[in-house]
Image (spheres, rainbow, N blue to C red):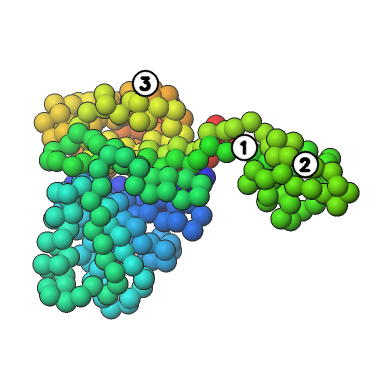
Amino acid sequence: MFEILFLGTSASAPSAKRGLSAQIVKHDEYRFLIDCGEGTQRQILQSGVGFKNLTRILLTHGHLDHILGLGGLLSTFLRWEAIEELDIFGGRSALDRVSDLLYGVVLRGNAPPMPLRLNEIKAGLFFEADDFTVSAFSVYHRGPDCLGYLFEGKARRPFLPEKADALGVPFGPERRDLVAGKEIVLADGKHVRPDDVLGPLQKGVKLVVVGDVGKTEDLIEICKDADALVIESTYTEEEAEMARQFSHLTARQAAELAVKAGVKKLILTHISRRYREKDVLKEAQAIFPSSIVARDFDSFQIKREEN
């Protein structure tokens, strides 16, 4: 299961109710901050999630409404020393701009308060844990090195407790060994194999997070069968030409991608101040009924079994 918390859902400039782009994706003890618009640190505090374990920041691109909050965040860490290390991931052009901001403006010759690493990534897998992976993929937007992110649980065979009970498998390390694929021997000498207590292989949960993007044709395969797709919806169809000009999407285009890719849930963000939320939602739901417009501090659990 993944959980996504929206900290900022406005496009380009904040509004009275929406901050600039930032989301946290959580899985067990892991936390990933995706983008860090101006004011993100206050949103983190107001949400109650705090800074603990927030050691990985993923940047979709280097536009200011997605990175300016990094300056304030590092400034706070200079005083609080709230985390032990910080890894920032992104394309080369985004990291160059972040380097100017952090080292040229915030630090100005001082050492960062923790190991600070700017990690250039390209399309492909760049993070792997025991039960999930994070990959980057290229998206089309203004400027080079724009990225989206795929969070994917690893395929697994579910443990069937009723079968284990029937075979007399005790609670404890024996069941853990079976889940790990090891055969065990019970106290009475009976052998129990993993196949005896594990169900068929199931795909892991799939969450796709797209930042700013101007076209969707090349995203269908990466989004295919996703349990949730998070993507921008800066415009509505009445201003489709402006969306094309600035390499953004309309709500209709985002919804059409959701249909073509067969996703389960569509969550729209990066909402322009020029629109009412209900108008964005109406346009998307006319094409894809399982559409949601995220608000600041909305949190969604992404679970495959819910679908």
According to the picture, the residue beneath numbered tag 3 turns out to be 260
According to the picture, the residue beneath numbered tag 1 turns out to be 157
**Position of residue 273 in the picture relative to residue 132 (left or right):** left
Q: Earlier in the sequence, mark 2 or mark 1?
A: 1
Label 3: few (<14), some (14–19) or many (≥20) C-alpha neighbours in 10 Å: some
Picture residue at 16% right of the left edge, 33% below the top: 247
**Position of residue 228 in the picture relative to residue 253 (left or right):** right
Q: Nearer the viewer, mark 3 or mark 1?
A: 1
The numbered disc on residue 192 is: 2
Residue 32, quarter of the rendered image? bottom left
**For the view shown, which residue lies furthest in the right direction?**
188
Q: As displayed, is residue 176 above or below residue 125?
A: below
Label 2: few (<14), some (14–19) or many (≥20) C-alpha neighbours in 10 Å: some
What amino acid type is highlighted by mark number 3? Lys
Residue 241 in view (yes/no): yes
Labels 3 and 1 touching (C-beta < 8 A):
no
Q: As displayed, is residue 38 above or below residue 149?
A: below
Q: Secondary structure at mark 1?
A: loop
Q: Nearer the viewer, mark 2 or mark 1?
A: 2
Kindly report the distance in space between the C-alpha atoms of the residues bearing marks 2 and 3.
44 Å
Residue 190, quarter of the rendered image? top right
Viewer-nearest residue: 55 or 259: 55
Viewer-nearest residue: 165 or 143: 165
